[in-house]
Image (spheres, helix red, strand yellow):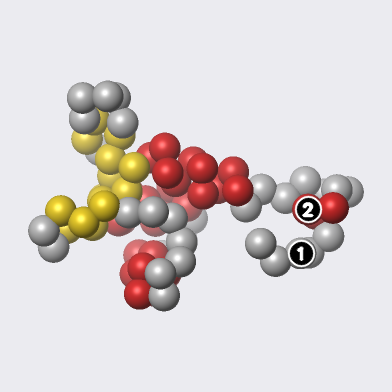
Amino acid sequence: MTTIKNHTTIVTELQAAKILGLSVQTLRNYRYLRTGPPYVKLGRAVRYLVEDLEKYLAARRIVPGTKEGRGHAG
C-alpha cells in the first residue's frame, strides 16, 4: 500500500482483489470489459485507489427487504 500527498491510499491489483474478495483474473476481465472499479495505469502497472474500491462496494450494497434487495441487477 502506498499513500500519496492527499492521503489517498493506492494498492496493487492483488491487494485490490483481496479487498474486494475477487480474483486478480476477475479484475483483469473487468478492465478488459471496461467494467468494475476505476483504476490507474502507471506505465504497465495497474493500481487502485482504496477510496474507489470503497465506493464500488458501497454502490453494490444490498439491504434485504428494500427495493434494492430484490435481486435487481445494478
Determine whether, in the image, residue 71 is placed left or right of residue 38. right
Q: Which residue is outermost to the left?
A: 43
Q: Name which quarter of the figure residue 74 lies in.
A: bottom right
* Above or below, 34 relative to 13: below
Residue 25 appears anywhere in the view? no
Counting from the top left corner in percent of width and height, residue 49 is at 34, 42
The kind of residue on which mark 1 rests is His
Which residue is the site of mark 2?
68
* Above or below, 54 relative to 7: below
Counting from the top left corner in percent of width and height, residue 20 is at 47, 52
Determine whether, in the image, residue 24 is placed left or right of residue 42. right
Residue 24 appears anywhere in the view? yes
For the N terminus, the image quarter is top left
Q: CA distance from mark 1 to mark 2?
A: 6 Å
- The disc placed on residue 62 is none
Q: Secondary structure at mark 1?
A: loop
Determine whether, in the image, residue 28 is placed left or right of residue 54. left
Counting from the top left corner in percent of width and height, residue 66 is at 85, 48
Which residue is the site of mark 1?
72
Tally the numbered discs.
2
Determine whether, in the image, residue 55 is placed left or right of residue 50. right
Q: Name which quarter of the figure residue 73 lies in.
A: bottom right
The kind of residue on which mark 2 rests is Glu
Check contact, mark 1 vs mark 2: CB within 8 A.
yes
Dot 2 crowding, Cα within 10 Å, few <14, some 14–19, many 20+: some
